[in-house]
């Protein structure tokens, strides 16, 4: 960094210092991760980074992106590439650490030149892989200074974010011009990246990492199998405020129609579990936290709150039907692939901007159905229990349809390998 850049970074840090100090005081949880946010990594990492080849750096935003990145990371590691992975959220980091306990998984630093410089000097990555839309300007500029090629994997520009990016594309163009390659989810995403300034020759459609079904269905733990053995299950996965209430209302409607089941609620953010427990108790429901199950067998009418990380994909396999959240709430939708891969028919609300492709696939075969409001959600759950065999068939149709879209993990891995080989060839 030159003197002007250092001066600007200093002024920025000075301006942000009151906000940082306030966050430090008001949110004690931030203190545990403060070092990581400023690019400080554990001393043990030096041993992992001391060998050859140089590591690949993979960054994902949160839980959903981390799950999508895991199989890509596993594929890269299988080829002998060490990988350092980061996420923007603690929940995402916990997913990475749960699924790859022996890997290096940390929090992404603040997008400030000093924090970025510290991390890049420490890790010295061969390639930086950014999952979906993690287009951090200082990180990409720092990679350019250190001659680290940047690859965007499963790149997407949503209906909500694209107009904002387009309004500032002149400011964004220097950042995007430094991107070595974009593996876009769809043709539409590819066109949007090109419109924003990525050279067309650097953009390819490699598919959606979230859409690529995993090779195996994860197994449910023995205690959950026993707990849910005696009753039908409806799962509300990755839910947001308002969606748990809609599912609890649907449960009441279904019971009045003669259908009983256990409702398993998995809030998108585990920190909301206490709120969800209180909400269910207010509806006079007996509630059990997953972490406090202790060998209990659940009975119809009870509510299970999933306050653990990593068990939702396996839980879908036990469900008669599932609702995926972020779709009645104005979020844009979360991972619909997990229940479909488990053979579970899915319901979702109208806010599906982030998962449009999988929605098209599911609606075509009637494996997934859109509901417009809580009343529609209740009606679809009642209809599912009116004919559980037809519901099961819809789930199988969805799983078969998903198989036709396998391959994005491999296509993305090949794109990264091409960039690595091209850089290695130009260095010789």
Image (cartoon, grey):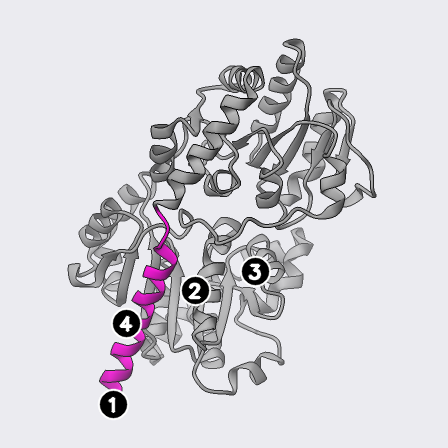
User: SS of the residue at dot 1?
Assistant: loop
Label 3 secondary element: helix
The numbered dot on residue 418 is: 4
Range shown magenta: 405-428
Mark toward the start of the polypeptide (4 vs 1): 4
Q: Earlier in the sequence, mark 3 or mark 1?
A: 3
Numbered disc in front, either 2 or 4? 4
Mark pair 2, 1: CA separation: 39 Å
Q: Tell me if I can see residue 125 in this picture.
A: yes
Residue 428: assigned label: 1
Q: Earlier in the sequence, mark 3 or mark 4?
A: 3
Q: Main secondary structure of the magenta part?
A: helix
The count of marks equals: 4
| Callouts 3 and 4 close, C-beta under 8 Å | no
Q: Position of residue 89 (x, y in %)?
A: 54, 55
User: Which residue was labeled with disc 3?
Assistant: 96
């Amino acid at each position: 960094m030159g003197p002007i850049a250092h001066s600007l970074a200093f002024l920025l840090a000075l301006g942000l210092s009151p906000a940082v100090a306030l966050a430090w005081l008001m949110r004690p949880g931030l203190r545990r991760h403060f070092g990581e946010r400023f690019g400080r990594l554990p001393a043990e990492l030096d041993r992992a980074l001391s060998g050859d080849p140089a590591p690949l750096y993979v960054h994902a935003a949160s839980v959903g992106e981390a799950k999508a990145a895991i199989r890509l990371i596993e594929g890269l590691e299988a080829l002998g590439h060490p990988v350092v992975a980061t996420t923007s959220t603690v929940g995402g980091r916990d997913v990475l650490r749960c699924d790859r306990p022996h890997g290096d998984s940390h929090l992404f630093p603040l997008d400030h030149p000093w924090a970025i410089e510290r991390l890049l000097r420490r890790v010295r990555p061969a390639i930086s892989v950014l999952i979906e839309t993690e287009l951090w300007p200082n990180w990409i500029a720092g990679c350019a200074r250190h001659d680290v090629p940047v690859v965007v994997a499963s790149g997407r520009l949503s209906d909500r974010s694209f107009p904002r990016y387009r309004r500032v594309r002149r400011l964004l163009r220097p950042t995007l011009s430094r991107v070595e390659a974009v593996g876009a989810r769809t043709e539409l995403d590819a066109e949007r990246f090109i419109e924003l300034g990525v050279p067309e020759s650097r953009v390819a459609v490699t598919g959606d990492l979230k859409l690529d079904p995993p090779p195996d269905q994860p197994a449910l733990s023995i205690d959950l199998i026993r707990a849910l053995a005696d009753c039908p299950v409806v799962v509300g996965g990755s839910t947001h405020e308002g969606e748990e209430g809609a599912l609890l209302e649907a449960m009441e409607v279904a019971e009045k129609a003669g259908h009983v089941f256990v409702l398993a609620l998995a809030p998108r953010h585990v920190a909301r579990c206490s709120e969800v427990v209180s909400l269910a108790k207010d509806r006079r429901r007996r509630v059990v936290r997953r972490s406090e199950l202790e060998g209990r067998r659940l009975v119809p009418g009870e509510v299970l709150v999933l306050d653990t990380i990593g068990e939702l994909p396996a839980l879908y396999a036990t469900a008669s039907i599932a609702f995926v959240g972020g779709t009645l709430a104005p979020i844009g939708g979360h991972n619909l692939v997990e229940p479909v891969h488990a053979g579970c028919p899915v319901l979702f609300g109208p806010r599906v901007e982030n998962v449009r492709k999988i929605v098209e696939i599911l609606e075509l075969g009637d494996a997934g159905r859109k509901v417009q409001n809580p009343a529609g959600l209740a009606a679809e759950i009642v209809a599912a229990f009116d004919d559980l065999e037809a519901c099961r068939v819809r789930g199988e149709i969805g799983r078969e349809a998903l198989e036709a879209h396998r391959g994005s993990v491999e296509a993305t891995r090949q794109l990264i390998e091409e960039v690595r080989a091209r850089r290695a060839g130009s260095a010789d």
